[in-house]
Amino acid sequence: MASNSRKRIVVGLSGGVDSSVAAWRLLEDGWDVHGLFMSNWEEDEDGYCTNATDYQDARDVCERLAIPLHRVSFAAEYRERVFAYFLSEYQAGRTPNPDVLCNREIKFGAFVEYARRLGAAHVATGHYARLDGTGATPQLTRAHDRSKDQTYFLHAAPDDALAITRFPLGDLTKKEVRALAAAQGLPVHDKKDSTGICFIGERPFREFLSGYLPAQPGPIVTEAGDVIGEHQGLMYYTLGQRQGLGIGGRQGASDAPWYVAGKDLDRNQLTVVQGHDHPSLQCDLVTGVRPHWIGGEPPVGCFACGAQTRYRQAARSCRVEIRGESVEVLFDEPQRAVTPGQFIVFYAGDRCLGGAVIASTARSAMAVDTAATG
Protein backbone atom coordinates (compact mmCIF):
# COMPACT_ATOMS: atom_id res chain seq x y z
CA MET A 1 0.00 0.00 0.00
CA ALA A 2 2.82 2.39 0.84
CA SER A 3 4.19 2.32 -2.72
CA ASN A 4 0.91 3.75 -4.04
CA SER A 5 0.31 6.34 -1.34
CA ARG A 6 0.03 9.92 -2.59
CA LYS A 7 0.15 8.70 -6.21
CA ARG A 8 -2.82 10.13 -8.05
CA ILE A 9 -4.80 7.84 -10.31
CA VAL A 10 -7.83 8.95 -12.33
CA VAL A 11 -10.51 6.31 -12.87
CA GLY A 12 -12.93 6.52 -15.77
CA LEU A 13 -16.28 6.30 -13.96
CA SER A 14 -19.27 5.42 -16.13
CA GLY A 15 -21.84 5.14 -13.38
CA GLY A 16 -21.78 1.35 -13.66
CA VAL A 17 -20.75 -1.34 -11.22
CA ASP A 18 -17.45 -2.27 -12.91
CA SER A 19 -15.77 1.14 -12.83
CA SER A 20 -17.16 1.75 -9.34
CA VAL A 21 -15.54 -1.40 -7.93
CA ALA A 22 -12.34 -0.52 -9.79
CA ALA A 23 -12.27 2.81 -7.94
CA TRP A 24 -12.90 1.13 -4.58
CA ARG A 25 -10.11 -1.43 -5.10
CA LEU A 26 -7.62 1.30 -5.97
CA LEU A 27 -8.66 3.25 -2.90
CA GLU A 28 -8.05 0.14 -0.80
CA ASP A 29 -4.58 -0.15 -2.33
CA GLY A 30 -3.63 3.32 -1.15
CA TRP A 31 -3.96 5.40 -4.32
CA ASP A 32 -5.07 9.03 -4.38
CA VAL A 33 -8.19 8.22 -6.42
CA HIS A 34 -10.10 10.74 -8.54
CA GLY A 35 -13.09 9.84 -10.70
CA LEU A 36 -13.69 11.23 -14.19
CA PHE A 37 -17.08 10.99 -15.87
CA MET A 38 -16.86 11.30 -19.66
CA SER A 39 -19.73 12.47 -21.87
CA ASN A 40 -19.03 11.17 -25.37
CA TRP A 41 -22.41 11.76 -26.98
CA GLU A 42 -24.77 14.72 -26.85
CA GLU A 43 -27.98 14.38 -24.90
CA ASP A 44 -31.00 13.46 -26.98
CA GLU A 45 -34.71 13.83 -26.43
CA ASP A 46 -36.00 10.36 -27.26
CA GLY A 47 -35.23 8.71 -23.95
CA TYR A 48 -32.42 6.41 -25.12
CA CYS A 49 -29.50 8.40 -23.74
CA THR A 50 -28.81 7.60 -20.07
CA ASN A 51 -26.06 10.16 -19.61
CA ALA A 52 -27.82 12.18 -16.88
CA THR A 53 -28.73 9.07 -14.87
CA ASP A 54 -25.25 7.61 -15.24
CA TYR A 55 -23.64 10.84 -14.05
CA GLN A 56 -25.85 10.90 -10.97
CA ASP A 57 -24.91 7.27 -10.24
CA ALA A 58 -21.22 8.17 -10.56
CA ARG A 59 -21.74 11.07 -8.14
CA ASP A 60 -23.42 8.77 -5.63
CA VAL A 61 -20.54 6.31 -5.86
CA CYS A 62 -17.93 9.03 -5.34
CA GLU A 63 -19.87 10.36 -2.36
CA ARG A 64 -19.91 6.86 -0.86
CA LEU A 65 -16.15 6.46 -1.46
CA ALA A 66 -15.36 10.06 -0.44
CA ILE A 67 -13.38 10.77 -3.62
CA PRO A 68 -13.62 13.76 -5.99
CA LEU A 69 -15.48 13.46 -9.29
CA HIS A 70 -14.58 15.45 -12.39
CA ARG A 71 -16.73 15.73 -15.50
CA VAL A 72 -15.67 16.37 -19.09
CA SER A 73 -17.27 16.24 -22.52
CA PHE A 74 -15.40 14.50 -25.32
CA ALA A 75 -18.39 14.71 -27.68
CA ALA A 76 -16.50 16.78 -30.26
CA GLU A 77 -13.52 14.41 -30.22
CA TYR A 78 -15.86 11.43 -30.46
CA ARG A 79 -17.67 12.77 -33.52
CA GLU A 80 -14.40 13.63 -35.25
CA ARG A 81 -12.33 10.56 -34.38
CA VAL A 82 -14.93 7.80 -34.04
CA PHE A 83 -18.37 8.62 -35.39
CA ALA A 84 -17.18 10.06 -38.72
CA TYR A 85 -15.25 6.84 -39.35
CA PHE A 86 -18.27 4.79 -38.27
CA LEU A 87 -20.50 6.46 -40.88
CA SER A 88 -17.92 6.32 -43.69
CA GLU A 89 -17.40 2.59 -43.16
CA TYR A 90 -21.12 1.83 -43.28
CA GLN A 91 -21.48 3.99 -46.37
CA ALA A 92 -18.72 1.92 -48.00
CA GLY A 93 -20.62 -1.32 -47.27
CA ARG A 94 -18.42 -2.42 -44.38
CA THR A 95 -19.37 -3.12 -40.75
CA PRO A 96 -17.15 -1.16 -38.34
CA ASN A 97 -16.61 -1.74 -34.64
CA PRO A 98 -16.72 1.71 -33.00
CA ASP A 99 -15.95 0.32 -29.53
CA VAL A 100 -12.36 -0.46 -30.60
CA LEU A 101 -11.95 3.08 -31.91
CA CYS A 102 -13.58 4.56 -28.82
CA ASN A 103 -10.98 2.84 -26.66
CA ARG A 104 -8.08 3.93 -28.84
CA GLU A 105 -9.15 7.52 -29.46
CA ILE A 106 -11.16 8.45 -26.38
CA LYS A 107 -10.64 6.20 -23.34
CA PHE A 108 -6.92 5.72 -24.01
CA GLY A 109 -6.43 8.95 -25.90
CA ALA A 110 -8.38 12.05 -24.89
CA PHE A 111 -9.10 10.64 -21.41
CA VAL A 112 -5.42 9.96 -20.68
CA GLU A 113 -4.44 13.46 -21.81
CA TYR A 114 -7.11 15.02 -19.59
CA ALA A 115 -6.15 12.85 -16.60
CA ARG A 116 -2.56 14.04 -16.88
CA ARG A 117 -3.81 17.64 -16.69
CA LEU A 118 -5.50 16.64 -13.44
CA GLY A 119 -2.11 15.61 -12.09
CA ALA A 120 -2.52 11.85 -12.58
CA ALA A 121 0.49 9.56 -12.70
CA HIS A 122 -1.77 6.70 -13.75
CA VAL A 123 -5.26 6.02 -15.09
CA ALA A 124 -7.64 3.12 -14.59
CA THR A 125 -10.83 1.70 -16.09
CA GLY A 126 -13.31 -1.03 -15.28
CA HIS A 127 -12.32 -3.17 -18.26
CA TYR A 128 -11.86 -6.89 -17.73
CA ALA A 129 -8.22 -7.31 -18.79
CA ARG A 130 -4.76 -7.62 -17.27
CA LEU A 131 -1.46 -5.88 -17.90
CA ASP A 132 2.09 -7.05 -17.33
CA GLY A 133 4.21 -3.93 -16.96
CA THR A 134 7.42 -5.58 -15.76
CA GLY A 135 9.11 -5.48 -19.17
CA ALA A 136 10.25 -2.64 -21.39
CA THR A 137 6.77 -2.41 -22.96
CA PRO A 138 3.35 -3.33 -21.51
CA GLN A 139 1.86 -6.71 -22.34
CA LEU A 140 -1.91 -7.01 -22.51
CA THR A 141 -3.31 -10.35 -21.37
CA ARG A 142 -6.76 -11.84 -21.01
CA ALA A 143 -8.84 -11.36 -17.88
CA HIS A 144 -9.31 -14.15 -15.38
CA ASP A 145 -13.02 -14.21 -16.28
CA ARG A 146 -12.80 -15.33 -19.89
CA SER A 147 -16.52 -14.77 -20.42
CA LYS A 148 -16.00 -11.05 -19.71
CA ASP A 149 -12.51 -10.63 -21.22
CA GLN A 150 -12.31 -7.34 -23.16
CA THR A 151 -8.83 -7.51 -24.68
CA TYR A 152 -10.45 -7.80 -28.14
CA PHE A 153 -11.69 -4.20 -27.73
CA LEU A 154 -8.42 -2.99 -26.18
CA HIS A 155 -5.94 -4.32 -28.73
CA ALA A 156 -5.50 -0.96 -30.49
CA ALA A 157 -4.82 1.11 -27.37
CA PRO A 158 -1.49 3.02 -27.63
CA ASP A 159 1.47 1.59 -25.73
CA ASP A 160 2.19 4.82 -23.88
CA ALA A 161 -1.36 4.84 -22.53
CA LEU A 162 -1.28 1.18 -21.53
CA ALA A 163 2.00 1.76 -19.72
CA ILE A 164 0.27 3.99 -17.14
CA THR A 165 -3.04 2.09 -17.01
CA ARG A 166 -4.34 -0.16 -14.27
CA PHE A 167 -7.13 -2.73 -14.72
CA PRO A 168 -8.27 -3.50 -11.16
CA LEU A 169 -10.88 -6.07 -12.27
CA GLY A 170 -8.54 -8.31 -14.27
CA ASP A 171 -8.46 -11.02 -11.60
CA LEU A 172 -12.17 -10.97 -10.75
CA THR A 173 -15.32 -12.54 -12.14
CA LYS A 174 -18.42 -10.45 -12.73
CA LYS A 175 -20.16 -12.26 -9.87
CA GLU A 176 -17.31 -11.32 -7.54
CA VAL A 177 -17.46 -7.69 -8.69
CA ARG A 178 -21.16 -7.43 -7.88
CA ALA A 179 -20.61 -9.11 -4.51
CA LEU A 180 -17.86 -6.61 -3.64
CA ALA A 181 -20.08 -3.72 -4.70
CA ALA A 182 -22.89 -4.95 -2.47
CA ALA A 183 -20.55 -5.57 0.47
CA GLN A 184 -19.19 -2.01 0.23
CA GLY A 185 -22.64 -0.47 -0.04
CA LEU A 186 -22.07 0.90 -3.53
CA PRO A 187 -25.45 2.10 -4.82
CA VAL A 188 -24.89 0.60 -8.29
CA HIS A 189 -24.25 -2.97 -7.10
CA ASP A 190 -27.36 -4.28 -8.87
CA LYS A 191 -27.42 -1.86 -11.81
CA LYS A 192 -28.06 -3.53 -15.15
CA ASP A 193 -25.08 -3.76 -17.50
CA SER A 194 -25.16 -1.45 -20.49
CA THR A 195 -25.49 -3.12 -23.87
CA GLY A 196 -25.17 -2.15 -27.50
CA ILE A 197 -22.92 0.38 -29.18
CA CYS A 198 -21.89 3.05 -26.71
CA PHE A 199 -23.50 6.06 -28.40
CA ILE A 200 -26.62 4.25 -29.65
CA GLY A 201 -27.64 2.56 -26.43
CA GLU A 202 -30.80 0.49 -26.50
CA ARG A 203 -32.45 2.23 -29.45
CA PRO A 204 -33.18 0.30 -32.69
CA PHE A 205 -29.98 0.35 -34.75
CA ARG A 206 -31.55 0.72 -38.20
CA GLU A 207 -33.70 3.60 -36.99
CA PHE A 208 -30.63 5.38 -35.64
CA LEU A 209 -28.48 4.82 -38.72
CA SER A 210 -31.23 5.94 -41.11
CA GLY A 211 -31.03 9.41 -39.57
CA TYR A 212 -27.53 9.75 -41.04
CA LEU A 213 -27.59 7.35 -44.01
CA PRO A 214 -31.06 7.42 -45.63
CA ALA A 215 -32.57 4.24 -47.02
CA GLN A 216 -31.41 3.16 -50.49
CA PRO A 217 -33.63 0.20 -51.47
CA GLY A 218 -32.37 -2.38 -53.93
CA PRO A 219 -32.78 -6.00 -54.94
CA ILE A 220 -32.05 -9.04 -52.82
CA VAL A 221 -30.68 -11.73 -55.14
CA THR A 222 -29.57 -15.33 -55.01
CA GLU A 223 -26.14 -16.41 -56.20
CA ALA A 224 -27.81 -17.34 -59.49
CA GLY A 225 -29.00 -13.73 -59.87
CA ASP A 226 -32.69 -14.35 -59.17
CA VAL A 227 -34.42 -11.41 -57.46
CA ILE A 228 -36.29 -12.68 -54.38
CA GLY A 229 -36.85 -9.54 -52.34
CA GLU A 230 -35.91 -5.95 -51.65
CA HIS A 231 -33.44 -4.57 -49.12
CA GLN A 232 -33.67 -1.13 -47.55
CA GLY A 233 -30.00 -0.17 -47.84
CA LEU A 234 -26.80 -2.22 -47.87
CA MET A 235 -25.53 -0.42 -44.77
CA TYR A 236 -28.32 -1.96 -42.71
CA TYR A 237 -27.10 -5.54 -43.22
CA THR A 238 -24.05 -7.54 -42.21
CA LEU A 239 -22.59 -10.82 -43.45
CA GLY A 240 -24.19 -13.88 -41.90
CA GLN A 241 -27.32 -11.95 -40.91
CA ARG A 242 -30.55 -13.94 -40.87
CA GLN A 243 -33.13 -11.67 -39.24
CA GLY A 244 -34.86 -8.80 -40.97
CA LEU A 245 -34.48 -9.96 -44.58
CA GLY A 246 -38.21 -10.22 -45.24
CA ILE A 247 -37.84 -13.23 -47.53
CA GLY A 248 -40.81 -15.58 -47.41
CA GLY A 249 -41.15 -19.09 -48.75
CA ARG A 250 -40.40 -19.57 -52.44
CA GLN A 251 -41.88 -22.12 -54.75
CA GLY A 252 -39.32 -24.79 -55.62
CA ALA A 253 -36.93 -23.71 -52.86
CA SER A 254 -36.19 -25.47 -49.59
CA ASP A 255 -37.43 -24.17 -46.25
CA ALA A 256 -33.88 -23.49 -45.04
CA PRO A 257 -33.37 -19.92 -43.75
CA TRP A 258 -31.63 -17.27 -45.83
CA TYR A 259 -28.44 -15.50 -44.80
CA VAL A 260 -26.60 -12.45 -46.13
CA ALA A 261 -23.54 -13.62 -48.11
CA GLY A 262 -22.40 -10.51 -49.98
CA LYS A 263 -22.92 -6.88 -50.95
CA ASP A 264 -22.49 -5.33 -54.40
CA LEU A 265 -22.26 -1.56 -53.97
CA ASP A 266 -22.08 -0.83 -57.70
CA ARG A 267 -25.37 -2.65 -58.34
CA ASN A 268 -26.83 -1.97 -54.91
CA GLN A 269 -27.52 -5.68 -54.57
CA LEU A 270 -27.64 -7.85 -51.48
CA THR A 271 -26.75 -11.51 -52.13
CA VAL A 272 -28.27 -14.20 -49.92
CA VAL A 273 -27.80 -17.95 -49.61
CA GLN A 274 -29.67 -20.72 -47.82
CA GLY A 275 -28.20 -22.61 -44.90
CA HIS A 276 -26.22 -21.55 -41.84
CA ASP A 277 -23.07 -23.30 -43.08
CA HIS A 278 -23.32 -22.49 -46.79
CA PRO A 279 -19.85 -22.49 -48.45
CA SER A 280 -20.26 -18.84 -49.46
CA LEU A 281 -20.36 -17.92 -45.78
CA GLN A 282 -17.02 -19.65 -45.12
CA CYS A 283 -13.47 -18.42 -45.59
CA ASP A 284 -10.01 -19.36 -44.37
CA LEU A 285 -8.01 -16.47 -45.87
CA VAL A 286 -8.26 -13.01 -44.33
CA THR A 287 -6.41 -9.85 -45.31
CA GLY A 288 -6.03 -7.25 -42.58
CA VAL A 289 -4.86 -3.66 -42.96
CA ARG A 290 -3.45 -0.98 -40.67
CA PRO A 291 -2.16 -3.50 -38.10
CA HIS A 292 -1.35 -2.36 -34.58
CA TRP A 293 1.11 -4.39 -32.52
CA ILE A 294 1.21 -4.07 -28.74
CA GLY A 295 4.80 -3.34 -27.86
CA GLY A 296 5.37 -1.55 -31.15
CA GLU A 297 7.14 -4.27 -33.09
CA PRO A 298 5.32 -7.16 -34.82
CA PRO A 299 6.41 -10.76 -34.41
CA VAL A 300 9.07 -11.65 -36.96
CA GLY A 301 8.09 -13.01 -40.39
CA CYS A 302 5.42 -15.68 -40.63
CA PHE A 303 4.19 -16.98 -37.29
CA ALA A 304 1.50 -19.21 -35.81
CA CYS A 305 -0.98 -17.88 -33.27
CA GLY A 306 -4.67 -17.73 -32.42
CA ALA A 307 -7.03 -15.13 -33.87
CA GLN A 308 -10.52 -13.81 -33.21
CA THR A 309 -12.63 -12.15 -35.89
CA ARG A 310 -15.35 -11.13 -33.44
CA TYR A 311 -15.89 -10.63 -29.72
CA ARG A 312 -16.99 -13.64 -27.60
CA GLN A 313 -15.31 -16.04 -29.98
CA ALA A 314 -12.63 -18.54 -29.03
CA ALA A 315 -9.30 -17.83 -30.71
CA ARG A 316 -8.83 -20.02 -33.81
CA SER A 317 -5.48 -21.41 -34.93
CA CYS A 318 -3.91 -19.65 -37.89
CA ARG A 319 -0.69 -18.54 -39.53
CA VAL A 320 0.04 -14.85 -40.04
CA GLU A 321 2.32 -13.33 -42.65
CA ILE A 322 3.22 -9.66 -42.26
CA ARG A 323 3.36 -7.69 -45.50
CA GLY A 324 4.27 -4.14 -44.57
CA GLU A 325 1.03 -2.34 -43.69
CA SER A 326 -1.09 -5.45 -44.14
CA VAL A 327 -1.27 -9.00 -42.85
CA GLU A 328 -2.32 -12.23 -44.58
CA VAL A 329 -3.99 -14.73 -42.26
CA LEU A 330 -4.57 -18.39 -43.13
CA PHE A 331 -6.80 -20.23 -40.67
CA ASP A 332 -6.38 -23.94 -40.05
CA GLU A 333 -10.14 -24.35 -40.54
CA PRO A 334 -12.73 -22.24 -42.40
CA GLN A 335 -14.37 -19.44 -40.41
CA ARG A 336 -17.99 -18.33 -40.79
CA ALA A 337 -19.19 -14.85 -41.76
CA VAL A 338 -15.88 -13.01 -41.33
CA THR A 339 -16.88 -9.40 -41.95
CA PRO A 340 -14.84 -6.62 -43.63
CA GLY A 341 -14.63 -3.57 -41.39
CA GLN A 342 -14.47 -5.62 -38.21
CA PHE A 343 -11.18 -6.41 -36.44
CA ILE A 344 -9.05 -9.53 -36.41
CA VAL A 345 -7.15 -9.77 -33.12
CA PHE A 346 -4.15 -12.03 -32.50
CA TYR A 347 -3.23 -14.01 -29.40
CA ALA A 348 -0.30 -16.07 -28.17
CA GLY A 349 -1.96 -18.02 -25.40
CA ASP A 350 -3.48 -15.39 -23.09
CA ARG A 351 -1.29 -12.59 -24.42
CA CYS A 352 -2.89 -10.18 -26.90
CA LEU A 353 -0.40 -9.40 -29.68
CA GLY A 354 -2.44 -6.77 -31.52
CA GLY A 355 -4.82 -6.72 -34.44
CA ALA A 356 -5.85 -5.28 -37.79
CA VAL A 357 -8.94 -4.13 -39.70
CA ILE A 358 -10.42 -6.90 -41.85
CA ALA A 359 -10.20 -5.72 -45.46
CA SER A 360 -11.17 -8.82 -47.44
CA THR A 361 -11.77 -12.55 -47.19
CA ALA A 362 -11.37 -15.52 -49.52
CA ARG A 363 -11.27 -19.27 -49.64
CA SER A 364 -7.94 -20.96 -50.29
CA ALA A 365 -7.64 -23.69 -52.91
CA MET A 366 -7.60 -26.25 -50.10
CA ALA A 367 -10.83 -24.88 -48.64
CA VAL A 368 -12.52 -24.91 -52.04
CA ASP A 369 -11.45 -28.50 -52.63
CA THR A 370 -12.67 -29.53 -49.19
CA ALA A 371 -16.05 -27.91 -49.79
CA ALA A 372 -16.36 -29.56 -53.18
CA THR A 373 -15.62 -33.02 -51.82
CA GLY A 374 -17.43 -32.55 -48.53
Image: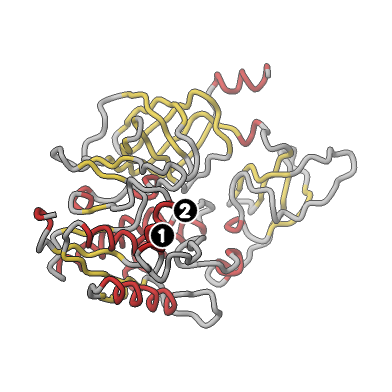
Residue 296 sits in quarter = top left
Q: Is residue 80 left or right of residue 269?
A: left
Looking at the image, do the residues carrying marks 1 and 2 touch, with CB atoms under 8 Å apart?
A: yes
Q: Quadrant of the C terminus?
A: top right
- Secondary structure of the residue carrying tag 2 is loop
Which amino acid is tagged 2? Pro
Residue 55 image position (x, y, % from top left): 38, 76
First in sequence: mark 1 or mark 2? Answer: 1
Residue 206 image position (x, y, % from top left): 60, 64
In the displayed image of the protein, which residue is found farthest to the right?
251
Which amino acid is tagged 1? Tyr
Q: What residue sits 51% from the left and 51% below the top?
A: 94
The residue that disc 1 covers is 85
Residue 20 image position (x, y, % from top left): 34, 64
Q: What residue sits 48% from the left and 43% below the top?
A: 310
Q: Is residue 366 above or below residue 230?
A: above
Residue 306 image position (x, y, % from top left): 41, 30
Instruction: Give me the disc on residue 64.
Output: none
Viewer-side label of 1, 2: 2
Task: Give the distance between the C-alpha atoms of the residues marked 1 and 2, in whole angstroms.
Answer: 8 Å
The residue that disc 2 covers is 96
In the displayed image of the protein, which residue is found farthest to the bottom?
45
Residue 246 sits in quarter = bottom right
Q: Quadrant of the N terminus?
A: bottom left
Q: Nearer the viewer, residue 43 or 244?
A: 43
- Secondary structure of the residue carrying tag 1 is helix
Q: Is residue 254 left or right of residue 115?
A: right
